[in-house]
């Protein structure tokens, strides 16, 4: 998918271009959020917040560091992380409910379908929780969200060689974890999914039609280099 003319900077200034930008990327952003959040209202709210953040962050987009989708995923990661911090501080459930915008029944049904479709991705992300934060972030974007190593590095604001080293370390850790996960069938399956093994992602969030690019499938992208 080609980026829109002028990129996010032009879209932030032109309502028609912004609508085109939104329609082009809303499904991918919704899938990204649905892999990390299991509530339809929160998915809707956070997806909207991502595109609102585009208006303020458009000037930070650098096409030479990756495409629009990678840049949006970087914003989405921050939005999801901010939401997790907010909910961790909340003590009253009523505050969460009253602060949500109402959704039409069709919207709820569509988002429930999205949540069902992304449930393997959520299990895969849960299987990565024992990895160090930096390594987990790279694996999430490359294996689960199907970015290239270059795009993942851009989304995280790190060097490509750093991303490759972290991916290499994560691959070794996941293999060791998978070897000990046999008694736990569900966790073992999730690890296999995260590693791109049997039943692993074939283009997560794209109906399984994309290339199988699990951890084993990105060896060539890992390369070798200095320490992260």
Image (tube, helix red, strand yellow):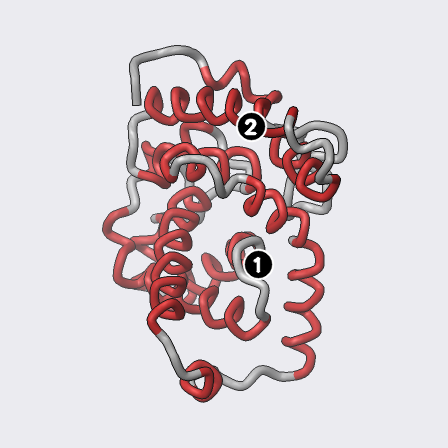
If the image is split into quadrants, where does the N terminus sit?
A: top right
Closer to the chain start, of discs 1 and 2, is 1
Q: Is residue 205 above or below residue 200?
A: below
- Mark 1 or 2: in front is 2
Label pair 1/2, CB-CB below 8 angstroms: no
Q: Looking at the picture, tell me which residue is in the foreground, 92 or 13.
A: 92
Residue at the disc numbered 1: 34
Question: Which quarter of the picture shows residue 98?
Answer: bottom left
Query: Which residue is painted at 65% across and 61% down in the image?
Result: 115
* Residue 46 x, y percent position in the rendering: 45, 66
In the image, 174: left or right of 63? Answer: right
State the image coordinates of residue 12 (x, y, percent, origin top left): 32, 61
Disc assigned to residue 153? none
- Badge 1: residue crowd in 10 Å (few <14, some 14–19, many ≥20): many
Q: Position of residue 201 (x, y in %)?
A: 67, 37
Q: Is residue 62 visible?
A: yes
* Residue 1 to residue 55: above or below: above
**Mark 2 residue crowding within 10 angstroms, few (<14) / some (14–19) / many (20+):** many
The residue lying toward the viewer, choosing from 218 and 64, is 218
Count of labels shown? 2
Quarter occupied by residue 193: top right
Q: In screen coordinates, is 68 left or right of 140? A: left
> Which label number is shown at residue 174?
2
The secondary structure type at the circle numbered 2 is: helix
Say above or below: 177 vs 146. above
What quarter of the picture does the C terminus occupy? top left
Residue 80 position in % (x across, y down): 41, 59
Residue at the spot x=30%, y=13% of the render?
226
Q: Residue at x 40, y 70 (%)?
A: 87
Specify whether 158 is left or right of 125: left
- At numbered mark 1, what does the secondary structure look like: helix, strand or loop? helix
Q: Is residue 202 visible?
A: no
């Amino acid at each position: 998918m080609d980026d829109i003319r002028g990129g996010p900077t032009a879209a932030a200034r032109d309502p028609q271009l912004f609508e085109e930008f939104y329609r082009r990327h809303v499904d991918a952003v919704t899938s990204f959020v649905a892999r990390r959040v299991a509530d339809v209202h929160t998915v809707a709210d956070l997806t909207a917040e991502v595109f609102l953040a585009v208006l303020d962050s458009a000037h930070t987009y650098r096409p030479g560091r990756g495409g629009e989708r990678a840049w949006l995923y970087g914003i989405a990661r921050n939005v999801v992380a901010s939401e997790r911090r907010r909910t961790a501080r909340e003590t009253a459930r009523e505050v969460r409910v009253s602060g949500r915008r109402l959704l039409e029944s069709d919207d709820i049904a569509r988002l429930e379908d999205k949540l069902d479709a992304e449930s393997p991705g959520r299990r895969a992300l849960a299987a990565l929780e024992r990895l160090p934060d930096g390594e987990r972030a790279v694996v999430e974007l490359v294996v689960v969200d199907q970015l290239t190593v270059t795009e993942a590095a851009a989304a995280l604001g790190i060097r490509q060689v750093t991303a490759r080293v972290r991916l290499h370390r994560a691959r070794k850790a996941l293999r060791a974890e998978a070897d000990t996960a046999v008694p736990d069938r569900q966790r073992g399956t999730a690890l296999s999914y995260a590693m791109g093994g049997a039943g692993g992602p074939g283009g997560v969030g794209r109906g399984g039609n994309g290339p199988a690019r699990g951890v084993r499938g990105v060896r060539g992208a890992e390369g070798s280099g200095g320490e992260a």
